[in-house]
Amino acid sequence: MKMIGKEVNQKESTASTSRIVICIPTYNERENIKNLIPAIFDIFKSSGFKDAHVLVIDDNSPDGTADEVKRLQQHHGNLHLLLRERKEGLGRAYVAGFRRALSMKAEIIFEMDADFSHDPRMIPYFVKSLERADLCVGSRRVKGGKVVNWGLHRQLISAGANLLTHMVLRLKTRDVTSGFRAVRATHLKRIYLEALQTNGYAFQIELLYLLERKLNAKIVELPIIFVDRQKGKSKLGVKSILEFILEVFRLFFVGSPVPIIEMDDGDTN
């Protein structure tokens, strides 16, 4: 971590001049988003990112999350809102966000939670890591990574999900359920996003499967300290857990039905 930090400060990197779009799905996250957005833009400024944006994908939250984003847009010109009609789950929110980010000509696209469980101060390290990789995963399961404030029940679910995935699918990535990721847009462009129908943990594992197995993406895992949310309620439920288990075995037996798009060299920018 310290070595990466020194590299970030030594010179202006190619990645830091790329167009960055951070996708943040929300549902009833008003109390979190009003503090998270300014914190992210402070990081953009201190890191010297010249073309960095935040895209909030809100599923018509009844608590007024979208109204809070609109208020914040008065202070942050690179803050964007994608307001959807109804709650359709994490996977569909990310698909909509990825499509919008690609239409914005993003070069680096982030997945990030709205509840401060993902530390915005890590953003520059993700960007730096993409100078030598196609996908950077914020990992709780490599040296230096850990979880804070999780109960035994949640720890067992996460450990069990990772163990099952490694036993069945043999993926190399250690933290397969992490939702803090940054990926090069060139790789997302090759995935037919509309065919991604999974949600929650299941969405994260299918996307990782496509990137690692089908696209042979070069993946690095960056140690993060994951802090459980302080405000609002977790979206993880029994349905999400069952969907994840079924998805792991579906990928094992039949693979992913999501088509991979072949692109000419001139189409990757």
Image (cartoon, helix red, strand yellow):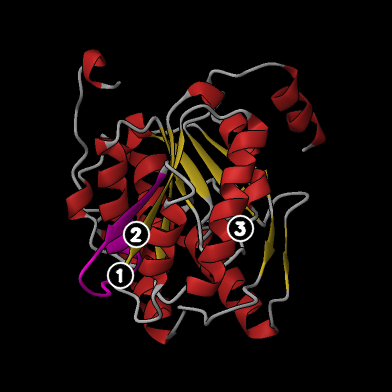
Please state which of residues 10 and 149 is positioned toward the viewer in this rendering.
10
In the image, residue 234 lies at what x, y percent? 51, 79
Whether residue 174 can be seen here: no
Q: Residue furthest front?
A: 74
In the image, residue 8 lies at what x, y percent? 70, 26
Q: Quadrant of residue 152?
A: bottom right
Circles 3 and 1, Cβ within 8 Å, touching? The answer is no
Q: Quadrant of residue 81?
A: bottom left
Q: Secondary structure at mark 2?
A: strand
Residue holding disc 3: 118
Q: Quadrant of residue 160?
A: bottom right
Amino acid type for the residue under numbered disc 1: Asp
In front: label 3 or label 2: 2
At x 69%, y 52%, the residue is: 224
Give the mark, 3 or 2, whose residue is nearer the N terminus.
2
Amino acid type for the residue under numbered disc 2: Ile
Q: Secondary structure at mark 1?
A: loop
Q: Is residue 155 magenta?
A: no
Please state which of residues 40 and 214 is positioned toward the viewer in this rendering.
40
Residue holding disc 2: 57
Q: Determine the CA span between mark 3 and mark 1.
A: 20 Å
**Is 193 on the left-hand or right-hand side of 16?**
left
Q: For residue 59, which numbered disc appears in the image?
A: 1
Residue bounds of the magenta highlight: 79-94
Give the mark, 3 or 1, whose residue is nearer the N terminus.
1
Please state which of residues 74 and 144 is positioned toward the viewer in this rendering.
74
In which quadrant of the rendered image does the C terminus lie? top left
Circles 1 and 2, Cβ within 8 Å, touching? The answer is yes
Above or below for 178 versus 43: below
